[in-house]
Amino acid sequence: MASSSSLTPISKRLEGEVAIITGGASGIGETTARLFVRHGAKVIIADVQDDLGQAICKDFNQDETISYVHCDVTSEDDVKNVVNFAMSKYGRLDIMFNNTGITGNVEPTILGTDNENFKKVFNVNVYGGFLAAKQAARVMIPAKKGQHDIRVNSVSPCAIATPLLTKAMRKDKEFVEEVVCSTTILKGVVPGVNDVAEAALFLSSSEAKYVSGLNLIIDGGYSTTNQSFTMLLKSYCLKS
């Protein structure tokens, strides 16, 4: 008799693990946080969206399951504080999901790009990831977690209609999904935050115990083709 549970027989894939998810208060980060908790992890959401982060914690009403800590990933003190929180509360850190990212003001030309906007995107998306990795390593290395027995992988999704993207495009979710699907190679499916969360779950679990140095691309095959030709062809057809 089949179980009615939505979890597979390999449920609780992160039982007892402690995870920090930066940018975990919305979009991909929120979905991943909720999925990790379902699979038995103790999750700490690190974000600057205080109201959203605290609201997620209230959904669970279990202090030992999920926590929120205000964190600007461009501040080493903030990132260090989140890691210290994990260690003081649970005594360990097993997973650091560097999920925080911003689009900044979208400008397609280099001459039109604002220097300060570029610096802000770089600081959050690159420097912020560096700080998170550095502070995680500070406590993982002594515990022999992931090169020191520490696995490092990344997830590269295609455009997904998260609040971040819809806000940047100034369009609603349905419109963004329509645009994304029109450019994908794999037809009949709409990419969503769950696809990225499930990938992060796999890479964080023991099922990927021998997977390290992997960039898992989730784009329906988009990156395997030369899209410039397709765009040129579409443009030509419209003019014709």
Image (cartoon, grey):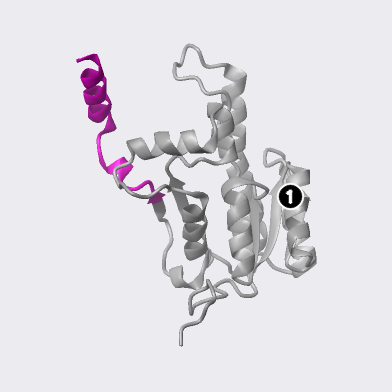
> Does residue 220 belong to the magenta stretch?
yes
Identify which residue is drawn at 73% across, 46% down. Answer: 52
**Residue 85, position in %: x, y?**
78, 58
User: From the viewer's perspective, is residue 27 above or below residue 198?
Assistant: above
Q: Quadrant of residue 131?
A: top right
Q: How many marks?
A: 1
Identify which residue is drawn at 48% across, 49% down. Answer: 192
Q: Which region is colored magenta?
A: 217-240
> Mark 1: which secondary structure?
helix
Residue carrying label 1? 53
Q: Quadrant of residue 125?
A: top right
* Quadrant that contains the C terminus: top left
User: From the viewer's perspective, is residue 31 above or below residue 10?
Assistant: above
Q: Amino acid at mark 1?
A: Gly
**Residue 179, position in %: x, y?**
41, 33
Q: Is residue 141 left or right of residue 211?
A: right
